[in-house]
Image: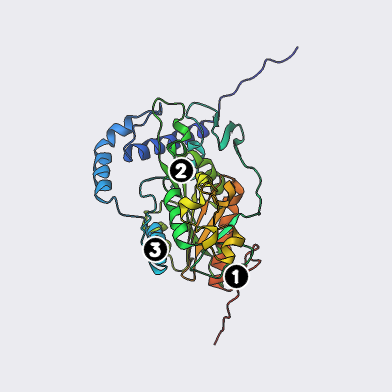
Amino acid sequence: MNSPTKYTFPDRRSVDKRQIILQNICLQLASLGHKCQLSTERGYLSVADSLLKNYSAQRQLLAEYRSPADQRIQNFLNDYFKRNGVEQTVKLPGETFSLNEPGLARELSLPYEGNAYKSDLVESYRLLQGVLHNPKNDRRTTSGVFHIVEGGLPIPADKKAVPVDVYANLLQVALDPPTELLSLPIASELEKPVDMWVSLLLRPIVRPEIEGVLPEKSLEVRMFAPGGLVSNLDFVETIFGNGGDPFLSENDAALDIDHWTGHSGCIILAPHLTRLTKKALGLPHYDEATARQRKDGMCWQKDDELYNDGFAFKVVCRDMNGVIVTIIADNYFGYSKKEIKSQISYSANLFGGVEEEHAGGAIAFPRFNL
C-alpha cells in the first residue's frame, strides 16, 4: 500500500527571514514618504511613527546632502565638467531606496504576493532555489559598445570618443528616466505603484590579503538603477557582496585607509538612452565634424539619426584622479558585472602592485622603490 503523501511547511527560519526583510522594506518606504502596502504586521510602524516623522523632516532639510561616496563622485563630475568648459551641473539621485542589507534587492524584484514579474526589459520568477531573472538581452556584443569621454585619460583607437558636453547631456537624461522604469516590481500588483531609484554600495576587492604581510584593498562602487531594474542589482550583489549603508561612517571608505585603494566607481543604468538622437545630444553635423568623429559616428547627416544607431552602449568618464563614472544604456546583466571588473582594473592600474584578470590594454606607469 502506498504511503500517504507528506506535506511540509516552509522552514520557520526562512519565513522569519523574509518577514524581517519585508519589515525593512516597509520602514524604508515609510521613511521616504511612501505608504506601506505590504500586508505584514505593521504594529512596529505605529511605534516608529514619531521617529519616521522626525526623519522625514530632517530629510527635507538635508535634501542636498549626499553620502560620502556619492559626494566624492559628485565632486569629480562637477570638477570634470568645469575643467572642460561645460557649464552644466548634473546631480546624482539624492533620494533612493538604499539596498543596505543583502536580500533586499531580491525581495524588491518580485511582486509582494506574486511569483512572477514581467516588463519590457526583464522577466523575474520566484523559484524554490531562489529567483530566476531573465533580462531582455542575454548576450553582449562588443561592436560599437565602448564609448569614452574626452578630456581624461587617452582613448584607444578602437573606442568611440565622446565630447564632454555630449556626455553631460547623456548623464542628464540618464538621471531622468521614464516613470515606467522607476516602478518597483514589489508594488507592481498593489493598488498604488512606488516609483523611485534604487542604489547599492559595493566594495569589490582589488588586492587580496596576504596574511601577515599586506591587508586586503578594495575600491568603492556606487550603483544606481531605476526601480524597475532592481533585479540587475540583485545579480551584482550575489557576485560582489553588499557594502552596507553608504551613510554610515563605518562604511565610509575614506575612514578605512588601510583597506581602501583611494578610488571610487559609479555605474548608472539607463536603457532609455538608446532612443536619443545625435542632434539632440549636441553632436556636430557631418560637415563640421573632425575626422575621428566621422570615423566613430559621432556626427549626423539626418535629424533623426539615433545615438549609436539605437543600439546598446556604455560610456565611461575617468581620469587620473581615481574616480570613474559609467552609464550603461542596457539592462544586460553581463555589462554590469564586466563594468565592475573593468573598474577593478582601473583601480589596480592606478594603485600599482596588483593585476586584474581583465587587465589587457592597461596603461603602464613606472613605479620605483627608492
Disc 1/disc 3 C-alpha distance (Å): 35 Å
From what the image shows, is residue 219 above or below residue 133? below
Q: Position of residue 315 (x, y in %)?
A: 53, 57
Of badges 2 and 1, nearer the viewer stands 2
From what the image shows, is residue 156 above or below residue 193? below
Applied colour scheme: rainbow
Judged from the image, the secondary structure of the residue bearing numbered disc 3 is loop
Quadrant of the rendering where the N terminus is positioned: top right
Looking at marks 1 and 3 on the same chain, the residue that comes earlier in the sequence is marked by 3
Rendered image: mark on residue 226: 2
Disc 2/disc 1 C-alpha distance (Å): 34 Å
- The residue at the point 56 percent across, 62 percent down is 293
Rendered image: mark on residue 328: none
From what the image shows, is residue 352 above or below residue 282? below
Looking at marks 2 and 3 on the same chain, the residue that comes earlier in the sequence is marked by 3
Rendered image: mark on residue 86: 3
| Kind of residue sitting beneath label 2 | Pro
Of badges 1 and 3, nearer the viewer stands 3
Quadrant of the rendering where the C terminus is positioned: bottom right
Mark 2 in CB contact with mark 3 (< 8 angstroms): no
| Kind of residue sitting beneath label 3 | Val
Judged from the image, the secondary structure of the residue bearing numbered disc 2 is strand
Residue, disc 1: 354
- The residue at the point 53 percent across, 68 percent down is 215
Disc 2/disc 3 C-alpha distance (Å): 26 Å
Residue placed most toward the observer, 79 or 51 = 79
Q: Position of residue 23 (x, y in %)?
A: 40, 35
Residue placed most toward the observer, 8 or 354 = 354
